[in-house]
Image (cartoon, rainbow, N blue to C red):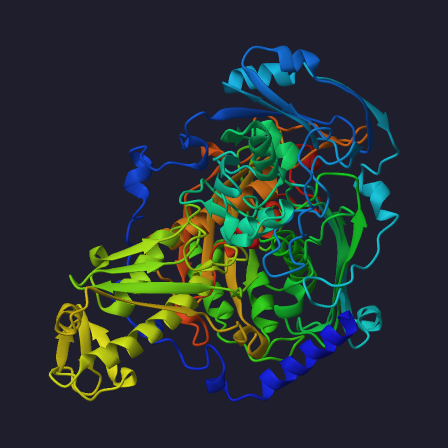
Amino acid sequence: MSILKDLGQKAMQLAIQAAPETWLPGGRPDPLAAKHGLIGAPVSRLDGALKVAGQARFAAEVALPGLLHAALLCSTIARGRIASLDTTAAEAAPGVALVMTHRNAPRMNPPALFGTSPNAAGPTDLPIMQDDTVHWNGQPVAVVLAQTREQADHAARLIAVTYDQADAITSFEAAKAHAHAPPSLMGEPSLLEIGNAEAALAAAPVQVDATYVTPRHNHNAIELHAATVMWEGDTLTIHDASQLVVATAETVADVFGLKHDQVRVLSPYVGGGFGGKCLWDHQILAAAASRLAGRPVRMVLTREDVYRLVGGRTNTEQRVALGARPDGTLAALIHTGVAAVTAHNDCPEQFSFPARHLYAADSFKVGQQVAEMDMLANTFMRAPGESVGTFALESALDELAEKLGMCPVALRRTLEPERDPTTGHAFSSRHLVEAYALGAERFGWAERSAIPGSRREGEWLLGMGCATGTYPYYRMPGAAARITLHADGSAVVAAAAHEMGMGTATVHAQVAAERLGLPLDAVRFDYGDTRLPPSPVAGGSSQTASVGAAVLAAHGALMAELAKLIGNDSALAGLSADALEARDGGLAAREDPARFETYASILGRAGRTELSAQADAPPPLETQKWSMHSTSAIFCAVKVSAITGEVRVTRLLGAFDCGRILNAKTAASQFRGGMIMGLGLALTEETLFDERTGRIMNASLADYHVPVQLDVPAIEVLWTDRPDPHAPMGARGIGEIGITGVGAAVANAVYNATGKRIRTLPITLDKLL
Ligand code: MOS
């Protein structure tokens, strides 16, 4: 079956390579790619005022009559069975309406694992509260519903539970002994070999061969995960904090044996997603408990619950080996290693992906293994793979530059490939060398001393480093959009889509207004509801392209409808949709801009109060034709205390090549936010397991350190702003690229300051003393 599928995919890829460009999505540049006006303008977030005024209602704030509040009790063992469970005291506690355990939970199907079908959203394929088996330390074993949250919390503590503990693999070290190749890495082969890289490495005059280690990380979005749920008969409404409403609704429907349209998910506001705001057990448990109680339920995870229930980035151990000639060109590029996963999820942290697309080399060996642990399933966390993969690869490049006696920027210029080095495909648009030039100039890279440990101010050792960031362009299948024009000249654009704080609502309003030739305040973008035309996951930095392509398709359909309405009395009489363009609240003839009629006039003459068109985006075949990646050059300056080993990042700059920037303000925030997460990855973040029990020890913001104000220097961002001719609006993704490269840029700066090469994240002071 999977061999047939692979052959089918291969044949499809060959056909796409052979097809004329104009047959493919992205084959003709989107006219908006070159258009100025609203596109690129630094428009403030349209939802900003509501949030500042406290009027944006998040999932945990939805008020429903008769609402019950949920609290969870989570397992304290990593693997085994519940031996005894006594809920009588909890049930008798004040305000308690219900205690749900595996004994009385409704019978539910296990969720379909993310990736196994187009709208599967399960974080694992484990059944949820259906039996007495424990699969990780932190798994919910009971849900308490009470009149108030405080009563629910109190009662949860009155539940007595004992366990029969089974042997568990709770350390990455132990898991690595069982490492094996996964069937695939997100559809790509788990090992890619071109030539004989090991032999080429051994024969190369200059060699780097090093091991890099990165820890587990947890999600810490400001908004806690929350779901407020309500049943009306067999119809379920979930007010969720979600970056994939459609897949959540369909998966939850399957879990309860309902039709897909019997579950509605609303998620108009999300306080940060980063890959963590997907389907986890809490939405399903809330719905199950609500069904049992016959009342609406609000489930808000505590910060500790988020650590126990919501997976994060997983541990990796990576080998990067580079075989170079004295001029810096590579004879061999090897990037291999292992990532921790669980037996019930499929999230291999594809750290080896950057090495497939970044640098020219004669031979490649790029791939990775996975090793199962008995822990909470790991998941997507901002640039899964690329964030930690670039730490290893870009640290190794820095090590090579030093061995060669070459400037690290010059080395990257030397290694710039003509075409994608492993697929051979043409790049859709790549200006990494330009990004390095822009960044180096602005940063003052020329002031860097090539001799480590040679610059000092009092107790502080000073250093500079740089690194490349990279993240693929993805466009997800399954996007649709609807545009409705009203006779008053306003328009509503609708797509299920997600606004997690990154500017979706604003950017799509800008894009639609520009495409329709309307002022921004004449356009409303409706989103965050599965009743709207479907949107795929807001993940993989893909949503702008996914929804944007659907809006482009809907606009094409709308233009065709408008052309039919024009009639003989219009200044535009006789023109087809292709001959029309939008401007100034109406349509004009492309060849003769003086021929113009407003939408209001066209609709009015036709006796229409509104005109609506909906369309599906074409499948994302452009990614099979071109190698499409956002890239960046990250520059960092640090000072390291010679006495305490404390690292302070004093400057951070990112020069990005991500195609067209659609909103200068929200894009800069995206880049900065990603780079700040990169500082956490470099210096502070690490999930610590108690290896005796598999329990996360630092499950709080007091113990798990994310960068705070004083850890973050002024961050400069700039961009090439070169439209990608093969992406909708000319724009590739910008959500995840910001974090990539930052870990290595910091590590390389620390090396430049101290002469100490730290290959294990985070770079804490103990490692520098
Ligand atoms: Mo991103 S980690 O795909 O939300």
Which of 426/418 is in front?
Answer: 426
Which of 710/93 is in front?
Answer: 93
Q: Quadrant of residue 390?
A: bottom right
Q: Quadrant of the N terminus?
A: bottom right
Q: Quadrant of residue 679?
A: top right
Residue at 56 percent of width and 61 percent of height: 470
| Percent of width and height locating residue 483 | 32, 64
Count of number-bearing discs: 0
| Percent of width and height locating residue 604 | 13, 69
In the rendered view, would you say 458 is above or below 572?
Answer: above
Outermost residue on the front side: it is: 233
Residue at 61 percent of width and 51 percent of height: 121
In the rendered view, would you say 242 is above or below 32?
Answer: above
Q: Quadrant of the C terminus?
A: top right
Q: Quadrant of residue 360?
A: bottom right
| Percent of width and height locating residue 2 | 76, 70
Is residue 645 rendered to the left or right of residue 78? left
Residue at 65 percent of width and 75 percent of height: 421
Does residue 186 appear in this view?
yes
| Percent of width and height locating residue 335 | 74, 62
Does residue 465 appear in this view?
no
In the rendered view, would you say 171 is above or below 179?
Answer: above
